[in-house]
């Protein structure tokens, strides 16, 4: 199994915020900025994406692991999970985000693809909200975000940096 970021997908369903845990999410495009998330078609969150054509990806810190897991266990169809969080809205006005999470990505639905059991939703990034405490010298610091990583049915915390991308390989000498 792959190593994937853990996010909470935020949607409004009948004007009520709902959050669902997902691990199949990531960057889809740099320009314009887009992200994607794959969601099982039977999930209640699908209704919110279809209803509003918006969603958010909320990045929890490791300290949020229990509530993050809970949001994947309990369906918003049966239980209101919005009272677990300080919910806020940004530019779109209908993509709920979690105030206590270090990073929130506000998205307008760009495209959806049916892939079998899941729909892949591509969202155009409208805005990114990040806690100022998570920056070092004006750059988002992954160690300060302390994101949750999912792999093999377990949650993990990221480790130390091992080198700068597009840089550490420059000195490799081919035989």
Image: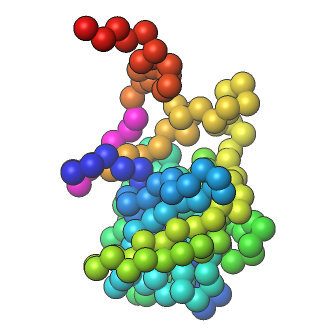
Question: Residue lying farthest front?
Answer: 175
Task: Estimate the x, y position of residue 54 in percent, counting from the top left.
Answer: 62, 76
Q: How many marks?
A: 0
Q: In this view, does 175 lie above or below 63?
A: above
Magenta segment includes 89:
no
Query: The C terminus lies in which quarter of the figure?
Result: top left
Q: Depth check: 100 or 121 in front?
A: 121
Rendering quarter of residue 86: bottom right
Residue 113's x, y, as percent? Answer: 43, 77
Q: Identify the residue at image location x=33%, y=71%.
A: 73
Above or below, 105 against 56 in this view is above
Question: Is 21 displayed left or right of 97 in the figure?
Answer: left
Specify whether 32 is left or right of 68: right
- The reply to whether the magenta stretch includes residue 155 is yes
Instruction: Identify the residue at image location x=44%, y=59%.
Output: 25
Residue 127: name its quadrant: bottom right
Residue 28 spot, x, y in % from top left: 51, 57
The image shows residue 145, relative to residue 171, as above or below, that is below
Whether residue 62 can be seen here = yes
Q: Which residue is drawn at 37% across and 46% down?
A: 149
Task: Quadrant for residue 11, please give it.
Answer: bottom right
Identify the residue shown where x is 45% and y is 65%.
37
Magenta residues (range): 153-158
Q: Main secondary structure of the magenta part?
A: strand
Question: Is residue 85 something one can see in this rendering?
Answer: no
Residue 146 image point, x, y percent? 49, 38
């Amino acid at each position: 199994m792959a190593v994937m970021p853990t996010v909470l997908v935020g949607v409004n369903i009948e004007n009520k915020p709902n959050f669902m845990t997902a691990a199949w999410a990531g960057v889809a495009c740099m320009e314009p900025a887009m992200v994607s998330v794959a969601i099982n078609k039977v999930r209640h969150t699908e209704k919110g994406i279809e209803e509003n054509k918006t969603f958010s990806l909320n990045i929890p810190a490791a300290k949020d692991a229990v509530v993050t897991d809970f949001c994947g266990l309990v369906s918003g169809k049966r239980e209101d999970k919005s009272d677990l969080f300080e919910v806020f809205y940004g530019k779109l006005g209908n993509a709920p985000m979690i105030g206590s999470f270090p990073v929130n990505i506000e998205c307008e639905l760009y495209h959806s693809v049916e892939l079998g059991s899941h729909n892949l939703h591509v969202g155009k990034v409208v805005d990114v909200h990040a806690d100022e405490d998570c920056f070092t010298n004006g750059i988002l610091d992954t160690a300060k975000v302390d994101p949750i990583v999912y792999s093999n049915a377990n949650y993990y915390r990221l480790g130390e940096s091992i080198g700068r991308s597009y840089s550490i390989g420059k000195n490799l000498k081919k035989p």
